């Protein structure tokens, strides 16, 4: 991502140079100059405390106290910060790369440069064996897959930690699985194929699992022509749902993210954790499983209101690719209520701005944490996205939660219009 930013900066400089005017051969060049990006990214106390969700349209530089250009914390929360991005072009050229950079620095760690990896795969029956080489080191991943009856190529859902696969197979969707613990242990141990290659880096295990999804997709694409590698869903529940969301964040090939009951560091808010009744939050998730994220998230322990982002920012950086979040109303710990009434509607503002309002879905159901019924709960939406089936229910419905907590994202009132 640093590279992307550097390229944008260079492009900006090139535009400042004289260029031929009125040349019919020359398409009109973009005049967009991105906001400066703080470098190095500052510590938690450079940001104002925000009790509501940070404005995703505000470049990070203008969210820092030093760079706010006279805007107060109250202004920033209300969407009255300076130099907000206004167009889709600015979003894709400037804001999205800056959000990606920020999220990697403060939460996920920097995703490895895939262009430096060599991936080879072999297929044997329903198994694919994948080998990744980079920098003279090698990691291997074993995946399994099951194809539906009939003629392919089939879309695929890649799952970690188990999935209710029969309804998917019956719907003509292939299922692939891999052992996430063999990619990166869910602990401080730094064992597994990801760490075999990147063991010296400060990267979160959620990002390592995301990398596992991507290398499995490489292997399927290379060896299983019955699978259409351009129609891909990723899923997992709880901590593995956090990983499935990360899998969409770091690879544009992922068509649909299906995080189930994912909570904090996934689709659950860092702020508003008291809505849950039980309270997974930044402090207890970073304290209990510090390995899920890179180390800098730890700076915000005790200061979660100073985070310049929240879970809606992760969704915003994935947009306009599709997300369906499964939430059980009996699942208090991961704050299903906050995911549904705070994060989902705030992220929806960005999807609407990008003209992709139908690509974000919330799937609220009865039941608790990681109930397998969640897979049926999202299936009509999965079929809609991966197979073009008409929707059979309203995936914007907040069910028994009623309506969005609009005071949690007051900047929506002044959100830029959806025109490109
Ligand atoms: C699949 O592999 C081919 C050949 O390497 C590549 O051109 C294509 O981009 C890959 N597709 C996906 C979805 O990874």
Image (cartoon, rainbow, N blue to C red):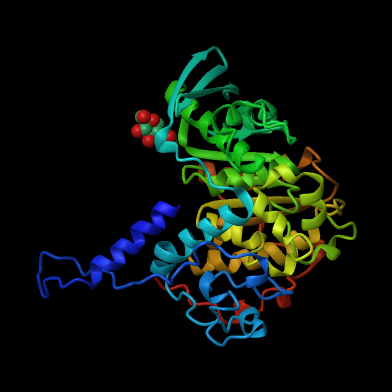
Write down which quadrant ligand 1 falls in: top left
Q: Is residue 132 left or right of residue 296?
A: left
Residue at the (86%, 58%) spot, across then down: 279
For residue 276, side relative to residue 38 (left or right): right
**In the rendered image of this protein, does residue 311 appear above or below residue 13?**
above
Figure quadrant of the C terminus: bottom left
Image check: 406 left or right of 5?
right
Quarter of the image where one finds residue 273: bottom right
Q: Position of residue 151 (x, y in %)?
A: 48, 24
Which quarter of the figure has residue 102?
A: bottom right
Q: Position of residue 63 (x, y in %)?
A: 58, 75
Q: Residue at x 65, y 33 (%)?
A: 159
* In this view, 57 is above or below 318: below
Q: Is residue 211 above or below residue 324?
A: above
Q: Is residue 391 visible?
A: no
Above or below — where is 311 with respect to 328? below
Asked if one can make out residue 367 in the rendered structure from this viewpoint, the answer is yes
Q: Name the residue furthest top.
A: 124
């Amino acid at each position: 991502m640093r590279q992307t930013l550097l390229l944008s900066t260079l492009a900006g400089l090139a535009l400042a140079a004289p260029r031929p005017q009125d040349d019919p051969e020359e398409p009109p060049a973009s005049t967009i100059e991105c906001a400066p990006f703080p470098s190095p990214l500052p510590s938690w106390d450079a940001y104002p405390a925000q009790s509501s969700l940070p404005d995703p349209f505000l470049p990070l530089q203008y969210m820092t106290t030093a760079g706010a250009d006279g805007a107060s914390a109250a202004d920033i929360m209300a969407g009255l910060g300076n130099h907000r991005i206004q167009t889709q072009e600015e979003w894709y050229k400037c804001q999205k790369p800056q959000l990606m950079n920020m999220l990697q620095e403060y939460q996920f760690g920097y995703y490895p440069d895939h262009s430096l990896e060599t991936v080879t795969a072999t297929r044997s029956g329903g198994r694919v064996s994948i080998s990744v080489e980079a920098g003279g080191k090698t990691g291997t991943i074993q995946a399994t897959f099951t194809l539906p009856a009939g003629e392919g190529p089939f879309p695929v859902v890649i799952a970690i930690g188990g999935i209710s696969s029969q309804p998917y197979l019956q719907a003509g969707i292939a299922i692939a699985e891999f052992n996430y613990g063999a990619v990166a242990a869910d602990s401080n141990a730094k064992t597994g194929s990801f760490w075999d290659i990147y063991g010296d880096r400060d990267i979160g295990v959620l990002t390592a699992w995301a990398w596992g999804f991507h290398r499995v997709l490489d292997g399927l694409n290379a060896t299983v022509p019955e699978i259409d590698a351009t129609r891909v869903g990723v899923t997992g529940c709880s901590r593995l749902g956090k990983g499935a969301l990360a899998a969409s964040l770091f690879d544009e090939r992922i068509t649909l993210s299906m995080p189930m009951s994912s909570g904090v560091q996934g689709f659950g808010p860092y702020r508003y954790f008291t809505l849950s009744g039980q309270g997974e939050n930044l402090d207890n998730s970073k304290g209990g499983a510090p390995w899920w994220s890179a180390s800098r998230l730890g700076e915000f322990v005790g200061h979660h209101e100073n985070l310049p982002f929240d879970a809606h920012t992760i969704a915003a950086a994935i947009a306009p690719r599709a997300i369906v979040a499964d939430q059980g109303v009996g699942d208090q710990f991961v704050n299903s209520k906050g995911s549904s009434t705070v994060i989902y509607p705030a992220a929806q503002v960005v999807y609407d701005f990008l003209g992709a309002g139908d690509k974000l879905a919330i799937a609220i159901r009865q039941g608790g944490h990681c109930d397998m019924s969640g897979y049926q709960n999202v299936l009509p939406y999965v079929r809609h996205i991966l197979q073009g089936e008409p929707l059979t229910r309203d995936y914007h419905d907040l069910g028994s939660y009623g309506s969005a907590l609009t005071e949690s994202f007051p900047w929506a009132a002044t959100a830029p219009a959806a025109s490109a």
